Image (cartoon, helix red, strand yellow):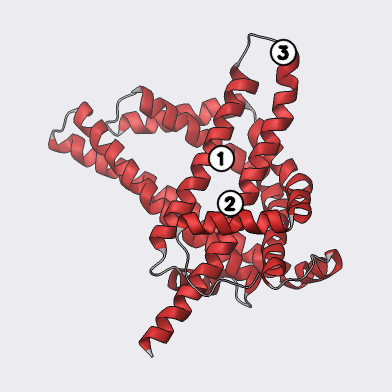
Amino acid sequence: MEPTPQSLHSSQIFTQTMRILISNPTTFIAISTILIYPVSSLHLSNPLIDQSIVKTIAQSLLFIANSSGLQSIPFMNQSCHKLSEILISSVVNFPLYCTLLLVSKAAVVYSVNCTYSRKKFVSIKFFLLMKSIWRRIVSTYFLICVLIVFCFTLFFILLLCFSKMLLAIGFSPDSIACVVVITVLLFLVLLAHVIIICDLCMVIAMWEDVSGFQALMRSSVLIRGQTRVGLMVFVGSTIGMGVVKGLFEHRVKVLSYGDASLRIWERPVLVLVYSFVVLVDFMMSTVFFFSCKSYGLEAVECGM
């Protein structure tokens, strides 16, 4: 299978991802079960997270929000709790994210490239490749983490200042809550664009001899004209992971009735399904990278 000479739509990216997966299932299943599965298990179960710390941080966030004129509505309570849970989970699982998860993503990029070039996945060659690019991808990953934390922090500060300003003008708490909900939705759209660029940036750092800020700039240039496709791919992957995570929360963590012996098998199965969804997400990001490169080449040829 040769790299596609034309840019792809989101459905075509998914179709080609499935073809690549079917063409070499052993390698990709091994990546999913050996590298991605342990990270997915900890990410879904969160056994190392102290819920009392999560509750304390959530209450602190809610207190700050209330002091800015935001009511303690269910949406606000759930948002603060979810944000604190994501924060603690990211800190606790960060060592796995910057080791196993990065290795698994690099393995997916290498495997997709092998499929395109009709070569076999050779473990020794892959580990030699990882030795040469490890510093590059780690530095790029740290930059991405700093960028995302900066976006969240800046948005949170601006949102609080904006809420205080509306309260001082004379807006009612209900009106402020509606404005905040709309603002959060707009921020999520912008955040999705940032994450798409960051995902593509990681593939670039693994594929090309650039890292950090250079890889980020390369990603922002490469994605031009393909942002909508990247957004559709991101939304599809996010929905898939959200559905599986929701099932895990309900069937494993919340459900307290029925046959408990049956739910013992549901935990590893759901973790396996989640790992597969993450694998497909990594593969689609890699295929999207090749699609963006093809789109860029087409644009250059048309310009000539």
User: With respect to residue 188, does 303 lie above or below?
Assistant: below
Count neighbours of disc 2 (C-alpha within 10 A) and say few if under 14, some if 14 to 19, many if 20 or more. many
In the picture, the quarter occupied by the C terminus is: bottom left
Which label belongs to residue 241? 1
Instruction: Name which quarter of the figure residue 276 lies in.
Output: top right
Q: Amino acid at mark 2?
A: Asp
The answer to whether marks 3 and 1 mark residues whose Cβ atoms lie closer than 8 Å is no
SS state under label 2: helix
Residues at marks 2 and 3, CA–CA distance in whole angstroms: 32 Å
Left or right of 219 in this view: 105: right
- Is residue 48 visible in the rendered image? The answer is no
Tell me whether circle 2 and circle 1 mark residues in contact (CB < 8 Å). Answer: yes
Give the residue displayed 58% in from the left and 51% down from the top. Answer: 281
Q: Earlier in the sequence, mark 3 or mark 1?
A: 1
Q: Which mark is residue 281?
A: 2
Q: What kind of residue is marked 1?
A: Met
For the point 69% across and 59% down, the residue is 108
Looking at this view, is 209 or 276 the one in front? 276
